[in-house]
């Protein structure tokens, strides 16, 4: 290990601690979703306002993730991880105790600020704690938390909300966080410190770009996109801030994000693919959860349980990959993962509200397998040829793009869903006239009788329901096409085994 790498007293306990930290952070991206209607009533918020409970956390985490490398180098990994877990735990308790919407949003922002470092820090620590030949197994272990957390979040959130209270969605982090703090303090020794300057201009420009983009995506549908001055301003601000950030990063001596990261070919392709994986991971869950509850009539707990097999499939696939990745080209696993994900999404384009629970469970397992085959080899290949001193910042950027993919994916599919419902409703309603022979043939007492107000209302409800079904199908088709379109990128990745052998030989010669 290099001098910057932590010395491990107990690798097993350290793995458990960083896994727990990863699962805490990953769970909180989705665990609150099913509890939003209950929070909305308790906090006296509108549907638009309660969405800030989710977006404030994502935006804060996205902005702060790239700072992980600087803080780890400046203050040490051990101090940073302890402070991050302690702060996340405190913020979780405050979220559970929040009495107003303002308090909840503020505490979620705080939770995102502290939680931003947990995933990239845990990934970097595991990479440095395991020898290079075991990186595949280490990433399989770590990936379970990152991938399974968001999938199991709705199930756990539904169970806690149903049998206890929505506040326990946040309180559950407190005992776990306290245990992780003591565990990390006991087994992780401090890394070597580096005297680094913080790039405030780069940080500010990057924060404005990410924050404005997320605001635009969150409020675009509500404000009718570019017909709103607010959306135009946010789009212009995001574009200008991103331009200033890129120019500054190319010219500054110590930029906020080190451009040397993008000199590595595998890293460039890897972060592009993880963006797509982020879209698939959360966008499909964000669509399926309301589909189960609104169109199929499943209770919140049952809807959460239906999503459980995805997590099981992901864990099984990751265990398989962890054992075989040292002997099989990781690109093969990536192609299999994309193929299974696309297959499951294509099958979902044929879902109707009378689809059986068995079909839903099997489809979830297949999709879980696909995601499991994607994440571990992608993490291994992306960081295979990066220098150790860039790993912490690289893992932060890797997690950032996964989160951005998730947030952008959710915003886009929800916008497409609402738009397609309107379009399909208008197309179907054209046939709902007294001149339609099928409607004229209905008996007078039929509940779709166009001569009565109740009949017209009932028919409109059914048209809306059918329009929603078609809109969901179109969204799943869009995700399936995106998944298949990402497959050629896998062929651009280099074989990490060959390059690792060359790097090891060069190190030995030195």
Image (tube, rainbow, N blue to C red):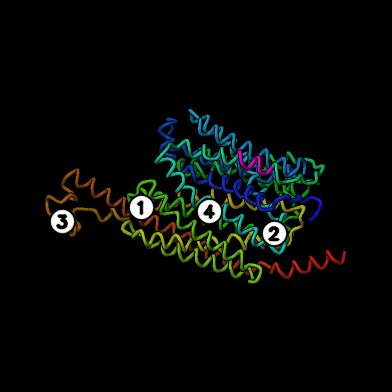
Q: Is residue 244 in view from this perspective?
A: no
Is 350 in front, or is 77? 77
* Mark 3, residue position: 440
Q: SS at mark 2? A: helix
Q: Is residue 343 in view from this perspective?
A: yes
Q: Which mark is residue 164?
A: none
* Mark 1, residue position: 468
Residue 299 vertical position relative to residue 320 in the rendered view, above or below = above
Q: Are marks 3 and 1 in contact (CB under 8 Å)?
A: no
Q: SS at mark 4? A: helix
Which range of residues does the magenta coloring cover?
A: 178-184
Q: Residues within 10 Å of mark 1 (few under 14, many from 20)?
A: many
First in sequence: mark 4 vs mark 2:
4
Task: Give percent across and percent down for residue 358.
Answer: 36, 61
Alpha carbon distance from label 1 to label 2: 42 Å
* Mark 2, residue position: 383
Alpha carbon distance from label 3 to label 4: 52 Å
């Amino acid at each position: 290990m290099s001098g910057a790498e932590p010395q491990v007293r107990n690798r097993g306990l350290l793995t458990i601690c960083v896994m727990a930290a990863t699962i805490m952070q990953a769970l909180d991206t989705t665990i609150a979703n099913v509890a939003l209607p209950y929070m909305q009533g308790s906090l006296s918020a509108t549907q638009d306002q309660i969405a800030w409970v989710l977006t404030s956390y994502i935006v804060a985490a996205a902005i702060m993730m790239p700072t992980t490398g600087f803080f780890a180098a400046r203050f040490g990994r051990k101090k940073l991880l302890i402070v991050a877990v302690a702060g996340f735990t405190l913020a979780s308790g405050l979220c559970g105790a929040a009495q107003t919407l303002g308090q909840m949003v503020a505490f979620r922002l705080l939770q995102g600020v502290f939680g931003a470092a947990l995933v990239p820090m845990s990934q970097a620590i595991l990479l440095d704690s395991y020898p290079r030949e075991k990186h595949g197994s280490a990433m399989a272990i770590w990936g379970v938390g990152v991938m399974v957390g968001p999938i199991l979040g709705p199930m756990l959130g539904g169970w806690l909300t149903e049998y206890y209270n929505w506040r326990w969605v946040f309180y559950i982090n407190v005992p776990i966080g306290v245990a992780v703090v003591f565990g990390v303090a006991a087994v992780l020794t401090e890394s070597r410190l580096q005297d680094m300057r913080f790039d405030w201009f780069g940080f500010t420009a990057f924060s404005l770009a990410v924050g404005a983009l997320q605001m635009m995506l969150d409020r675009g549908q509500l404000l009718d996109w570019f017909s709103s001055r607010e959306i135009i301003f946010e789009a212009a601000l995001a574009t200008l801030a991103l331009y200033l950030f890129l120019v500054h990063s190319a010219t500054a001596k110590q930029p906020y994000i080190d451009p040397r990261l993008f000199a590595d070919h595998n890293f460039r392709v890897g972060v592009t693919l993880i963006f797509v994986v982020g879209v698939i991971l959360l966008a499909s869950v964000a669509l399926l959860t309301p589909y189960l509850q609104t169109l199929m009539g499943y209770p919140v707990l049952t809807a959460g349980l239906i999503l459980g097999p995805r997590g099981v499939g992901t864990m099984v696939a990751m265990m398989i990959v962890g054992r075989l990745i040292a002997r099989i080209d990781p690109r093969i696993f990536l192609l299999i993962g994309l193929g299974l994900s696309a297959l499951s999404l294509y099958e979902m384009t044929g879902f109707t509200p009378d689809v059986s629970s068995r079909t839903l469970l099997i489809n979830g397992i297949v999709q879980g397998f696909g995601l499991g085959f994607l994440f571990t080899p992608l993490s291994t290949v992306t960081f295979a040829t990066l220098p150790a001193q860039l790993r912490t910042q690289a893992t932060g950027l890797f997690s950032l793009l996964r989160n951005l993919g998730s947030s952008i994916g959710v915003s886009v599919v929800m916008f497409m869903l609402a738009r397609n419902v309107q379009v399909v409703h208008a197309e179907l309603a054209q046939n709902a006239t007294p001149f339609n022979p099928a409607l004229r043939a209905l008996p007078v007492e039929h509940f779709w009788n166009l001569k009565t107000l109740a009949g017209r209302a009932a028919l409109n409800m059914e048209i809306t329901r059918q329009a929603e079904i078609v809109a969901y199908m179109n969204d799943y088709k869009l995700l399936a096409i995106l998944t298949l379109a990402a497959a050629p990128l896998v062929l651009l990745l280099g074989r990490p085994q060959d390059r690792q052998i060359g790097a090891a030989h060069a190190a030995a010669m030195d």
